[in-house]
Each structure stands twice: as structure tokens, then as C-alpha cells.
Image (cartoon, helix red, strand yellow):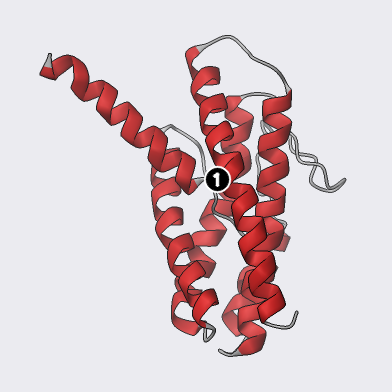
């Protein structure tokens, strides 16, 4: 029985980590390859299947990892610093899980590079806190819309699709929560 439950436990553990970690993000950045079907320019991200959903998350997760590593040291507002710490932990988890699932990491696009440059160059203090939290708010709005798009496609056949839908369903609640939290922090910061 131990041998049968170990793979199930590992799957559940990865699923839970991925669902929590999918809350990661960056600014309105999508660095997807041609396989991803995200219409970012029009402001309405879409994902038609599990692979597109994963592809829509990996770029922002990588950028969130980079920006949150900076923010945990540069943030001066206690709520910004706390949020950055949570985001960093999630970014480490989600990028690891997505890579383990075979999700390729796209090169950073111009917007991602600009966001990273802004986070690096803004001195510690209120302006940094605002820039970081604004980027997180925009990213979580994007991820929320991506998850809603994927879930709106209806039930699709296949184990990967079932797993993807479960992860998107769990993640959607967290994306919405992070939109609310970052909105609140921005108000506290006077933005």
C-alpha cells in the first residue's frame, strides 16, 4: 500500500505547491512562445488548454522571482516586504514545478526587461514599494483573467487537462485574493 500511495502523495504535493505558486507574477508581462495563445496586447489573456495555461504563467513567474529577490531587500513598507517574501517563496516553488512539468522558459520580452530594470534602478523607499506592488497588482489581474479564460473553455478530455483545470480553479481564488491585497497595499502607500 505504501508504494501505491507514495506517487499519489507526490502528485498531490506538487499540485498543491503549483496551485499556490501560480499566484506569482510580474507586471503586465507575457513572454510566451508561439505555442501560447495569450492576447496580451488586447488586454484579454486567453488559454485554451492546460499547456497554454502553464505557458501563460511561467514568464511572469520567472520575472516575479527576479523582482521579488530584489524587493525582499529593498522594500521599506512592512506589508510590501511581507508580500515580497511570500511572492519569492511562491516564485521558487512555481518555477520549479513548471520546469518539472516540462514548461519551457521563454526569453524576457521588452516589457519584462523594462520592469526588471525599473525595479533594479528604483532606490529603496516609498517609490520602490509602489512600483513593486503596482507590478504585482497588474500581474495578478492578468493571471486572474488567464485562469478565468482557461476555465471558461469547458471541460476537456485528458488527465493533463483535468489537472490543469484543478490547478486553475484553486489558483483563481488566490489570484483574486492577491489582487485585493495588492490593491489594499497600494492604497496604504498612497498610490
Where does residue 63 sit, x and y in percent of width and height?
A: 56, 59
Q: Residue furthest left?
A: 2
Where does residue 147 sit, x and y in percent of width and height?
A: 66, 37
Where does residue 178 sit, x and y in percent of width and height?
A: 60, 56
Q: Which residue is pictured at 56% across the width and 47% down the height?
A: 174
Q: Is residue 36 visible?
A: yes
Q: Which residue is pictured at 53% across the width and 75% down the height?
A: 79
Q: Is residue 113 visible?
A: no
- Give the residue pinned by disc 1: 58
Q: Which residue is pictured at 63% across the width and 41% down the height?
A: 56
Residue 121 shown left or right of residue 110 in the figure: left
Residue 69 shown left or right of residue 47 in the figure: left
Residue 25 shown left or right of residue 89 in the figure: right
Q: Which of these two is toward me, 54 or 188?
A: 188
The quarter of the rendered structure image containing the N terminus is top left
Query: Up-down: is 143 above or below 164?
Result: below
CA neighbours of label 1 inside 10 A, class few (<14), some (14 to 19), many (20+): many
Query: Up-down: is 112 above or below 161?
Result: below
Q: Which residue is pictured at 46% across the width and 55% down the height?
A: 91
Q: Which type of secondary structure does the marked residue at label 1 adopt?
A: helix
Amino acid at each position: 500500500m505504501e508504494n501505491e500511495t507514495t506517487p499519489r502523495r507526490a502528485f498531490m504535493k506538487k499540485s498543491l505547491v503549483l496551485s499556490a505558486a501560480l499566484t506569482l507574477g510580474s507586471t503586465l508581462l507575457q513572454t510566451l512562445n508561439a505555442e501560447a495563445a495569450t492576447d496580451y496586447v488586447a488586454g484579454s489573456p486567453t488559454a485554451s488548454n492546460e499547456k497554454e495555461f502553464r505557458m501563460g504563467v511561467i514568464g511572469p513567474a520567472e520575472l516575479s522571482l527576479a523582482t521579488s529577490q530584489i524587493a525582499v531587500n529593498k522594500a521599506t513598507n512592512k506589508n510590501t516586504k511581507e508580500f515580497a517574501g511570500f511572492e519569492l517563496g511562491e516564485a521558487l516553488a512555481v518555477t520549479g514545478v513548471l520546469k518539472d512539468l516540462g514548461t519551457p522558459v521563454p526569453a524576457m520580452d521588452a516589457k519584462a526587461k523594462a520592469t526588471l530594470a525599473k525595479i533594479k534602478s528604483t532606490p529603496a523607499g516609498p517609490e520602490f514599494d509602489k512600483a513593486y506592488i503596482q507590478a504585482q497588482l497588474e500581474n495578478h489581474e492578468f493571471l486572474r483573467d488567464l485562469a478565468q479564460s482557461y476555465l471558461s473553455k469547458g471541460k476537456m478530455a485528458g488527465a493533463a487537462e483535468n489537472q490543469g483545470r484543478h490547478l486553475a480553479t484553486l489558483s483563481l481564488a488566490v489570484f483574486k485574493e492577491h489582487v485585493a491585497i495588492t490593491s489594499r497595499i497600494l492604497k496604504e502607500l498612497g498610490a
